[in-house]
Amino acid sequence: MTMNKGLAFVVSAPSGAGKGTVLAEVLAEVPGLTLSVSHTTRAPRPGEVDGISYHFCTRGQFQTLVRHGDFLEWAEVHGNMYGTSRLSVEKLLAEGLDVILEIDVQGAEQVLRRMNPPPVTIFLIPPSLAEMERRLRARATEAENVLALRLVNAAAEMRTMSDYEYLVVNDRLDEAVRQVVAIIYAERAKKRRLLSGAPAPLWGV
């Protein structure tokens, strides 16, 4: 029996939406789900581990990977470069794992063009721009000029939310996690039905 390929999920969010916190909870709750580890030229933040949080690399190393066509998507965001390894994602999917690509809106556009079948897309937003700014300031990991750039970019990213299949508001962490988990299980059930060739039930018709 051939192992079915996994599903790919793209999860995007503006800075301060709490994407990392939500996804950590989702990954702990859903078996058979893994996170694609991106490459970045950004310096590690306190507590981040190379190869687990990101594959940290120099700008020169990153540009070499771009020239070789090794990225499924890549983008420059807030002055740093981020990219998703094509081979890494394809290997995980071939193993039957469902894979979350935690990427920005630029990367999501590239992935939608290049992956077949296309990934399931989820956009996570904070309850308001004011709350997003409060969360970023509470994080206290960036200088004021970088924070200002993140807020400007976040407002632009919010305008793309209608391009995504699912929208999740992260007002309460437990509710946001519940919604993302429900989306994953719903897409898994849809995939199984399509693979089996079974017609959709006509209850109530």
Image (tube, grey):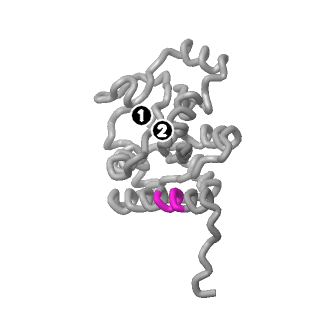
- Say whether marks 1 and 2 touch (CB < 8 Å): yes
Residue 81: image x %, image y %? 54, 26
Residue extending farthest to the bottom is 204
Q: Quadrant of residue 53?
A: top left
Amino acid type, mark 2:
Ala
Q: Secondary structure at mark 2?
A: helix
Query: In the picture, residue 130 is in which quadrant?
Result: bottom left
Q: Which residues are magenta?
A: 185-189
Q: Main secondary structure of the magenta part?
A: helix
Q: Nearer the viewer, residue 6 or 125?
A: 6
At x 60%, y 54%, the residue is: 164
Tell me if 52 is positioned left or right of 82 in this view: left
Residue 164: assigned label: none
Q: Is residue 56 left or right of residue 79?
A: left
Residue 118 visible in this rendered orientation of the protein:
yes
Residue occupying the point 34% across, 26% down: 49
Q: Which residue lies at the image location 49% right of the left edge and 45% below the top edge?
A: 98
Name the foreground residue: 113 vs 91. 91
**Residue 84 % position (x, y):** 55, 31
Instruction: Reply above or below: 146 against 154.
Output: above
Q: Which mark is residue 144?
A: 1
Badge 1 crowding class, 10 Å Cα cut-off, few under 14, some 14 to 19, many 20 or more, is few
Residue 190 on image: x %, y %? 56, 61
Q: On the picture, is 137 further left or further right than 158?
A: left
In whole angstroms, how far apart are the C-alphas of marks 1 and 2? 6 Å
Amino acid at pointer 1 = Glu
In the rendered structure, does residue 8 fall within the stretch colored magenta?
no
* Residue that badge 2 annotates: 148
Quarter containing the C terminus = bottom right
